[in-house]
Image (spheres, grey):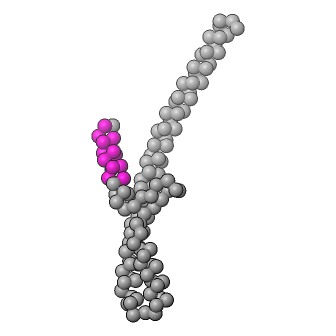
Amino acid sequence: MPREAARDELADIIQVHQRALECTALMVQALRPVLLVQLVFCVFIWCLMMLYFTIAAEELTKCVYACGWPGMDLEIQQGLQMVLHRTQWPVGIQAGKFCFVDMERFQKMVNMSYSFFIVLKDAF
C-alpha cells in the first residue's frame, strides 16, 4: 500500500474514532439525568415496598390478636395460629434467590448509599 494511501486511510480512521468519542460523550451527557431519575425511583419503590410489608405484617398481627381468637372454635384457633406464626417471620424483599433484605439491612443500605452520595457530591 502506498504511503499516501495509508496516510489517508489512517486519517479517516482517526476522524471516525474522534466522532465515536464525541458521540459517546453526548450519550453520557444525555443519559446522565435519565439514569439518576431511574436510580431515585428505584430506591423510592424499595422504600415503599418495605414500608408496605412492615405495616401490613404489623396490622395483620394486631388484627388477629384483637379478634378474640382464644374464645373461637379449635379449627379457627389453629388457622389463626398459623397466621400468627407467619407474621413472626422476618419481613423483607429478595431479589431472585440471591440476597434477602430485611428492614434493618435495608436501612443500613440506604444510610450507606446516602453516605456515598454525599462523599461523591462533595468530591465532584
Q: Compared with residue 113, is residue 51 higher up or lower down, i.e. above or below?
A: below
Side of 117 relative to 9 (left or right): left
In-front residue for pair 10/47: 47
Front-most of 90 and 14? 90
**Residue 113 seen in the figure:** yes
Farthest-out residue, right: 1
Vertical arrangement, residue 54 with respect to residue 42, above or below: below
The quarter of the image holding the N terminus is: top right
Q: Is residue 41 visible?
A: no
Does residue 21 lie above or below 8 as drawn? below
The location of residue 16, given as percent across then percent down, is 59, 24
In this picture, which residue range is highlighted in magenta?
109-123
* Marker count (numbered): 0
Residue at horizontal 69%, vertical 6%?
Answer: 2
Q: Position of residue 120 (x, y in %)?
A: 33, 41
Q: Residue at x 65, y 7 (%)?
A: 4
Relative to 72, residue 59 above or below: above
Most foreground residue, 41 or 84: 84
Nearer to us in this view, 38 or 95? 95
In magenta stretch: residue 118? yes
Snapshot quadrant of residue 63:
bottom left
Q: Position of residue 40 (x, y in %)?
A: 42, 53
Main SS, magenta residues: helix
Q: Is residue 50 magenta?
A: no
Estimate the x, y position of residue 30 in percent, counting from the top left.
49, 41
